[in-house]
Image (tube, coloured by chain):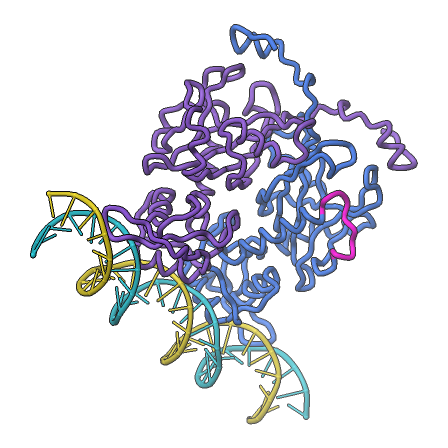
Chain colours: A purple, B blue, C cyan, D yellow
Amino acid sequence: MSTYKTEEDYLKHYDPRQYEQPLATVDMAIFTIIDQQLQVLLVKRAMHPAQGKWALPGGFIDMKQDKTLSDTAYRKLKEKTGVDSPYLEQVATFGDASRDPRGWSLTVAYFALIAGDQLALCADNRSEDISWVPLSNVDNFKLAFDHARVLQACHERMKAKVQYTSLPVNLMPAEFTLGELQKTFEILLDSPLEKKAFRRRMSDADILEDTGELKTGSSRPAKLYRAKLRGENHYFSRLMEGPR
Amino acid sequence: MSTYKTEEDYLKHYDPRQYEQPLATVDMAIFTIIDQQLQVLLVKRAMHPAQGKWALPGGFIDMKQDKTLSDTAYRKLKEKTGVDSPYLEQVATFGDASRDPRGWSLTVAYFALIAGDQLALCADNRSEDISWVPLSNVDNFKLAFDHARVLQACHERMKAKVQYTSLPVNLMPAEFTLGELQKTFEILLDSPLEKKAFRRRMSDADILEDTGELKTGSSRPAKLYRAKLRGENHYFSRLMEGPR
DNA sequence: ATAAATAGTGGCTTAAAGCCACTAATGTGT
DNA sequence: ACACATTAGTGGCTTTAAGCCACTATTTAT
């Protein structure tokens, strides 16, 4: 290993291909709620390796197209769902010599939340090779690579965050009622919540804005709210506990 | 792009060098407490790029040596400090086209905590090119690459976790007093804590074991405790608040 | 008119933190 | 010997935010 006088000199002679690098991918768990159930988007792999197996959407970082890591995530998300402004959060990176048969690889895992009203955009994506799957049913899919573990990490992180942030607001349409918001929390947590405690918590947090409008239905009309800030979460100082 | 009959067939023809991959590194913020101050280990870069600048310890994944990503982290930690069983936690991955002049790169950031009593092992590492730096003083170092941002993420994650877990226990020697433990929390948080609330919290959590021994000093002797489980954190359901 | 359903609140209980003053046990200085 | 400084440890009240659950409110359906 020789030394160079200046960094320019060093860089001029630097060949990035001289050291083999691990394969680097981004994989994501894209969550939404359909039919009152938490669902995750899975794709059937069209090519080797793991051809024919279901997997999380994802793929290689494209060094030409993607300026940053999250560009890769947004690009993949747009390709699969047509949605381009979801809630997106990096979860963790998994890397080892054996998770991909092609060699040493690492994948940066993200989770995304897509609001119900954005979903229409990709409704016709329900082809044979891409599908929303209820989380309660993913165990019946033998996921490719280590995607079961990756999905589990994404799911756990998401659930944990629902307990101490306003994360579920990101799954709501522009205007919604407190009842609908509570239901969303409950679906993500897979656990019922206490109505009074929930409403007090939201109101104390001061993150919602009364639209002045009402949502009428088959019972008493409910006030419609809108999130004061989208994309940003409120952090509570206690976990949401729920009835025992 | 051609198709193959079987995965074996595909893999036989697969050349990992056909697609250039981003450079993949691991960088870490190794924290300890020296002189009642939170300190982080920095190394002065011996070679280009960023030669002569201070940086977080880290380096390329060695696909031969390292079976997993955390192997890389443990290897780097051992190389720099001699310590081989610290508390280690992955924080986040940073990747983009411009953070390293050699090209598209990503780094997986970890933070590590090293207990005071393990520190003796690397005391003579205080050479010119590797040094513990008080966190209050890192601003005076112009860190290489995007390491200022990486360090900030590590520091923030660590502080956040001190607020709702028993993380600081990992910085304690085998036996310690409640006063010493509280002081450690306070140094990591950079904020004083209420004695009674702190002790009640620890005692309610049931994570410490009374050794039956006392630590004598220049005042009333204090009970010595030992952690019931090392390496694992207790999660509290509220943040530690501290006096206002 | 009455029932069903969901919205929204009042008001008490509980869990865990804040506050702060008090007692306890040791070494130090005179 | 004895006061004093210093840190350990506790008692007991206040505060905050949650749990609990029954009560009222407003709509549509029958």
Q: Is residue A160 visible?
A: no
Q: Residue at x 62, y 9 (%)?
A: B13
Q: Give A68 or A225, whichever is nearer the viewer.
A: A225
Residue A147, percent from left and from top: 48, 28
Looking at the image, the residue that sits furthest to the top is B5
Q: Give B151 or B40, whichever is nearer the viewer.
A: B151
Residue A220, percent from left and from top: 25, 53
Residue A151, percent from left and from top: 46, 33
Total marks shown come to 0
Q: Residue at x 34, y 36 (%)?
A: A37
Q: Give B31 or A185, whichever is nearer the viewer.
A: A185
The image quadrant where one finds the N terminus of chain A is: top right
User: Which span is picked out in magenta?
Assistant: B138-147
Q: Residue at x 53, y 41 (%)?
A: A89
> Magenta stretch containing residue A5, yes or no?
no
- On screen, residue A23 versus residue B239, left or right, reads right
Q: Is residue B123 visible?
A: yes
- On screen, residue B157 versus residue D26, left or right, reads right
Residue B3, percent from left and from top: 56, 8
Q: Give B196 or B173, whichever is nearer the viewer.
A: B196
- On screen, residue B168 versus residue B116, left or right, reads left
Q: Does residue B121 lie above or below A138 as drawn?
A: below
- Place residue B26 in its image quadrant: top right
Report the magenta stretch's main SS.
Answer: loop
Q: Residue at x 70, y 57 (%)?
A: B135
